[in-house]
Amino acid sequence: MNDSIKKNILNMSISKKKTLIISSALIFISTILVFFYIQKANENYRNIKIDKYKHIVYLKTEIKDETYPKYIPFININSNDANKANIDIDSFANKYIDKSETIISYEYNISGDYLSLVLKAEDYSVNFGPEVEFKTYTFNLDNQKTISNDELLKMFNINTSDVSRIIEYDLNNYYEDLVNEDYYKNNNCNYSCFLKHRGVTDYLENVSYYIKNGDLVAYKPFIIYSSLNDGDYFNSDNYEFIIAETDKK
């Protein structure tokens, strides 16, 4: 075999090696890109959405009003449980949508594999109030199913007695603060009087649960603006009672 033939064979071998290396590199890059795309799709939950280009919870209906706006959400998850929740959301909104002095709002939170949504209706047409109603929904994003209140409490190793005790403790702290800040004297309005003006007869009545940044939160409605003229002490955050805090922070 002459030198020219050897040189051609060597060049062909080098060329094949280069082609193989390039092909392998392209396959590797393609695999990485596909993996990255799948990861991003999972991060944005595109794989479980009805509309892939919208948020997992988005604003479906908005009634603009400077004083009493109404915002109604849609849960963008392709599952039977999500469909039932969306029907329930519409039913909740329909109770208030024609009430001119009512605000409807919502917020949602994704904590790990769990999506929580809270709806709030505030009716200002009453003498003292507002009258507030909460409605919450929690989904396991792995299987797109709703989680019941009992399941939520079990997840956080909490029972209803714990919830009642925590809400009582926090409301009592509000009362003590009001007394200390001279809103009214202890002998003029004791704790039972305070609860009566807040419309609280049962700590667990109308409580709704929500996972917020990994914590279990209970929304407990009560009257903020009462005849005691202590309404400026409270704000909407006071409806929120932290029941159990996550260790993963």
Image (cartoon, helix red, strand yellow):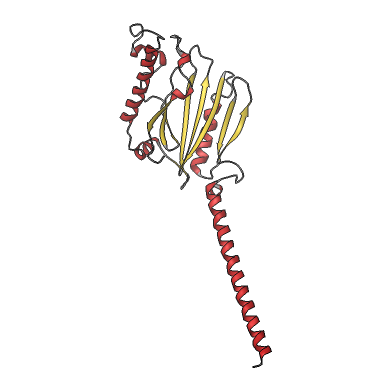
Whether residue 4 is visible: yes
Numbered label tally? 0
Q: Quadrant of the C terminus?
A: top left
Q: Could you say which quadrant of the image residue 168 lies in?
A: top left
Q: Could you say which quadrant of the image residue 148 lies in?
A: top left
Near-viewer residue (77 or 108): 108
Q: Residue 242: x percent and y percent?
A: 40, 30
Q: Residue furthest right?
A: 4
| Residue shown at 47% from the left, 35% from the top | 137
| Residue shown at 46% from the left, 18% from the top | 234
Whether residue 195 is visible: no
| Residue shown at 53% from the left, 52% from the top | 39
Q: Quadrant of the N terminus?
A: bottom right
| Residue shown at 62% from the left, 44% from the top | 53
Q: Residue 13: x percent and y percent?
A: 62, 81
Q: Residue 76: x percent and y percent?
A: 56, 41
Where is 53 relative to 163, above or below?
A: below
Q: Residue furthest bottom?
A: 1
Near-viewer residue (217 or 132): 217
Q: Residue furthest front?
A: 3
Q: Left or right: where does residue 239 sit relative to residue 161? A: right
Q: Residue 24: x percent and y percent?
A: 58, 69
Where is 3 relative to 162, above or below?
A: below
